[in-house]
Amino acid sequence: MQGELPTKASGLRKWRTACLMVTILIALLLTLRLAVDSSFTTIGMLREGGVTTGNLMASPEGRESSSSLLADTAFEEILTRGAPILGNDANCHRGAPTCSWMAKIPDSTKLIHMNLPGTHDTATWNYTKARQKELLRYTGEIPPAHFFRCQQSSIFQMLNDGIRVFDLRYAYNPGNDTIGFYHCMRSHRSRSFWRPQTTLIDVLYGYSAWLERHPTETILLSLNHEGNTGTVEDERIQEMVLDIFSKPTNEDTLVNKMKRRFWIQKRGELGTLGESRGKIILLQRFSYRLLNPSPEVPRLHGLDLGADRWTDNGDDIHLVYNPESGATAFIEDRYAITLPPSATPSTDAYITAGPDAQTADQLFITFASAAFLQDPTEGFYMYPRVTVRRWEGNTPGMNERLLHYFEQRKGQRFGVIMLDFYDAVPGLVETILGA
């Protein structure tokens, strides 16, 4: 019996040791599990609480769309098709101040209180002499390409350079039964057509893709039907546009996923930056006048700045976009400019009068651009590229004047400033943001 005791004692010690090891292992596993749960909880709280780094979205629906929208196999094909208008996103240079400039602004800031640089006739950047020749069968003989062109950088580059408001002109594309991009010169009754293969919806996906990578930013899209294109605008065309810009339905489609994730769904309101981050806001310059019955307001979103109320070549336009609150857009869109022979143009003539005590919470939009100007008797022609730059050696162009204008008015609010060739004068966008 005594000989067996050491054996039993030894076995008991081994059993106790084994139990202790198992207990320690279980404790370690529980600790690890708690740490992992805590990490995921922290990440979840960060995601729920606001913008995160990388490609994490600011909301649960954003996270869902990150895996189901941009990862969709059709999405790359869409971006490729949209490249002639969108360009290719080279991403931002490290430390570039304009790429995510909204990240430094508090969430509580109202969008109407911000200075927002924009581009007039955004889609014209890729309209070259070669491209015009290629599209001759669609347009017929029209003035040279540089008469139509108002930009030189792609949409993706504009976004990276700090542009946040975009002026897009659309019309029916009979070649593939879609909505495409146009620009017309009314004085010549001529039209230019950008890309028959690139559609409006392709470009909207491109903006969504950029916001996926820059969730601190907000984009305002001004959409306007371009008249005098020679293409039909009937009830069916307006229904096509309504399908794009109405609120999402419950159908599980790529378009509905894009709408839910990337579009602000409010109607007649321009809210705070915080609630608009990672989103697109529609500035609706078109109407649904041909639809019967007219679409119900709950189906729509964005600000109604309808073309029926937008004064052509107006320098003091007042558009109420929310009748209940009285919210109004004060707009300067005088593009047909003539000057006395001896006069030096004043920059003040191009900038909408700033807000005062009565208009402090209203929207201001200024188009600092001009149409093609000519005086055949003097052999004088001026097109957008010339208008914004220094000409005849000593006369500063529009953008150079704007640069000095905003430099002298730092700390003032101007609202939305729509530019031609925004990058023709270095530092203009940064100065608008600094103002």
Image: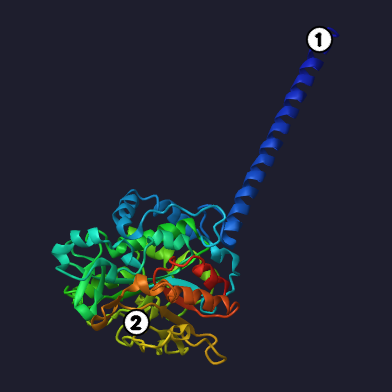
Colour scheme in use: rainbow
Give the residue at the far right of this rendering: 2
Quadrant location, the C terminus: bottom right
| 44 and 321: which is toward the camera | 321
Query: In the depicted view, which residue is nearer to us: 178 or 230?
Result: 230
- For image coordinates 57% across by 57% down, the residue present is 52
Local crowd size for mark 1, using a 10 Å CA cut-off: few (<14), some (14–19), many (≥20): few
- Residue 335 numbered mark, or none: 2
Res. 289 visible in picture: no
Q: In which quarter of the image is residue 211?
A: bottom left
Tell us which disc is closer to us: 2 or 1: 2
Under circle 2, the secondary element is: loop
Q: Where is residue 349 in the image (x, y as percent from the top left)?
A: 44, 86
**Going 33% across and 64% down the picture, which residue do you hit?**
125
* Mark nearer the N terminus (2 vs 1): 1
**Mark 2 to mark 1: distance in Å?**
108 Å
Report the number of discs.
Answer: 2
Q: Estimate the x, y position of residue 239 in percent, counting from the top left.
A: 24, 73
Amino acid type, label 1: Glu
Please name the residue that numbered disc 1 is placed on: 4
User: In this view, which residue lies farthest toward the top?
Assistant: 3
Q: Can residue 57 be seen in this view?
A: yes
- Of residues 74 and 183, which is closer to you in this image? 183
Q: In the image, what residue type sits under mark 2?
A: Tyr
Taking the image as shown, residue 309 lies to the left or right of residue 411, namely left
Residue sitting farthest toward the bottom? 358
Residue density around tag 2, few if under 14, some if 14–19, many if 20 or more, within 10 Å: some
**What x and y, as percent, mark residue 299?**
35, 76
* Label of residue 111 in the image: none
